[in-house]
């Protein structure tokens, strides 16, 4: 999939005048070679993922389909959604932080996308964006980035096999 450019990753969370949080959401399609990411610039935490999936990926005949999905692999009911779980290190002293930064900077040239150490959160369509943000291991440092993968494809199954995926459990 083409890399997101420009405003897609330049947007940051903010508070509205009434104090309600708003944040950007980016939908990425890693199994679609020519799919640009979709950016929602200012979403409330209460927005449901299912509503946005139906808007972005309507059933054939129910709305305008993405031009890059000629095979109709990306349908709202047939995609799995994942959020990368980023971790934040805890440091007791500034020296610990300095050592961490030095080690991270030295290793940055060896970074590999989707490494075996990445952790992912499988997000059900019934979840709100706030449900993802409230997950104890999710750290928001910019937009909420969600990856959509067609269910059951060989690429999806291979990715799931090599990835550490946790299920988001919704409170009932």
Image (cartoon, helix red, strand yellow):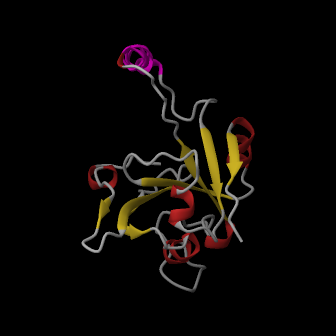
Magenta residues span 95-110
Answer left or right for 155 relative to 102.
right
Residue 60 screen position, x and y as percent: 59, 80
Residue found 55% across the figure and 45% down from its top: 84
Q: Is residue 91 above or below residue 88?
A: above
Which residue in the rendered view is the most extreme toward the bottom?
62
- Indicate the quadrant containing the C terminus: top left, top right, bottom left or bottom right: bottom right
* 108 magenta-colored: yes
Q: Main secondary structure of the magenta part?
A: helix
Residue found 51% across the figure and 84% down from its top: 63
Residue 29 screen position, x and y as percent: 52, 55
State which quadrant residue 144 falls in: bottom left
Which residue in the rendered view is the most extreme toward the front?
92
Q: Is residue 98 above or below residue 132?
A: above
Answer left or right for 72 relative to 12.
right
Residue 82 screen position, x and y as percent: 60, 53
Nearer to me, 41 or 102: 102
Give the total number of marks visible in the rendering: 0
Q: Is residue 98 above or below residue 158?
A: above
Residue 15 screen position, x and y as percent: 30, 64
Nearer to me, 130 or 149: 130
Q: Is residue 151 above or below residue 18?
A: above
* 69 magenta-colored: no
Residue found 47% across the figure and 53% down from its top: 145
């Amino acid at each position: 999939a083409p890399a997101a450019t420009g405003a897609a990753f330049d947007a940051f969370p903010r508070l509205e005048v009434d104090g309600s949080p708003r944040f950007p959401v980016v939908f990425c399609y890693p199994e679609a070679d020519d799919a640009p990411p979709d950016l929602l610039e200012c979403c409330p935490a209460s927005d449901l993922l299912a509503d946005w999936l139906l808007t972005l990926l309507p059933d054939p005949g129910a709305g305008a389909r993405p031009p890059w999905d000629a095979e109709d692999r990306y349908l709202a009911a047939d995609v799995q959604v994942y959020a990368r779980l980023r971790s934040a290190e805890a440091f007791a002293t500034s020296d610990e932080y300095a050592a961490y930064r030095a080690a991270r900077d030295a290793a940055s040239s060896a970074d590999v996308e989707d490494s075996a150490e990445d952790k992912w959160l499988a997000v059900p369509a019934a979840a709100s964006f706030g449900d993802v943000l409230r997950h104890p291991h999710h750290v928001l440092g910019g937009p909420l980035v969600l990856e959509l993968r067609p269910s059951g494809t060989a690429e999806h199954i291979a990715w799931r096999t090599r990835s550490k995926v946790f299920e988001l459990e919704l409170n009932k």
